[in-house]
Image (cartoon, rainbow, N blue to C red):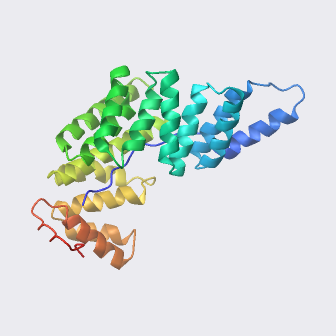
Amino acid sequence: MVQPMHVSGFRFATPVHAVLGALLLTACSPNGPRPASGRLGLGLADSALAGGAPTLALQVSKAVLQRNPNDVPAMLRRGDAYLQLGDAPRAAASYRQALILQPRSVPALMGLGRVALASDPAEAGARFSEALAVDPANQAALSDRGVSLDLSGLHAEAQTDYRRAIALGNADAARGLDDGAENGALAATEVDLAVSLAISGQPSEAVRILQPIAASPDATPRVRQDLAMALSLDNRPDEAAHLLLTQMSQDQARSAMAGYQALRPDAPATPAGTDGS
């Protein structure tokens, strides 16, 4: 059993309804500014992706591509929309089309890596490495390559990538170059590092990293469950169970605890032909 990792996703700040409102105001104003339709459309596509509306983003990107079939940014948004919709083949086709026109496109390489992540971590890692060859300081590429390495069982290498991404993020923060989205990405990478440490025999260090993140009012249930997993692996089952019971039912918590114990290095192997239940 491999603990699911937190894959870096789409992090945009503007809600869809705000952009739609701005579009309506612009359309209703006879003297208002009229930005280029392609640029305006892609801004709407970005906001739709951030707001969990990939179907709208797909419609917008397709409309832009109808006007300009070689618009690489629109191809990238179309790929992102397909990826959010779970259509990996069409997402990959969009990213590959973008790469034909821009062979060193980091977003296209990142997209192909994310498409491959669930089915072929080694292929995903190769794509993220290609992106890093173009942009060595790309924090998202480092973090996502770390996920691919963790999924391949290469935990030490994964942790090196996570730490490099975190160091870059902290350096940006010290220079005042970060924003809300980058803060969220940094926290997600810290969680990925902690999970990697927990499942590779360093649960105490994982608990140290996760406790302040999980204590935040903005912490997601997933982060708190990751902390429970680390506590369980750190031989603190009572604390882990107590935390889980704030997130789920008693039966669900019992099942989760059993799953965490299966991650222990000394856990007995599941006999062939059984499901481990």
Q: Is residue 137 above or below residue 93?
A: above
Q: Is residue 140 left or right of residue 24?
A: left
Q: Residue at x 31, y 46 (%)?
A: 192
For residue 40, which quarter of the picture?
top right
For residue 141, which quarter of the picture?
top left
Q: Position of residue 147 (x, y in %)?
A: 31, 43
Mark yes or no: residue 212 visible.
Answer: yes
Q: Is residue 155 left or right of residue 128?
A: left
Q: Residue at x 25, y 45 (%)?
A: 150
Q: Residue at x 24, y 72 (%)?
A: 275
Asked whether 41 or 86 is in front, the reply is 86
Q: Position of residue 266 (x, y in %)?
A: 9, 63
Asked whether 146 or 217 is in front, the reply is 146
Instruction: Give the residue furthest to the left.
Output: 266
Mark yes or no: residue 208 visible.
Answer: no
Instruction: Give the residue furthest to the right.
Output: 30
Q: Position of residue 95 (x, y in %)?
A: 49, 33
Q: Position of residue 132 (x, y in %)?
A: 34, 26
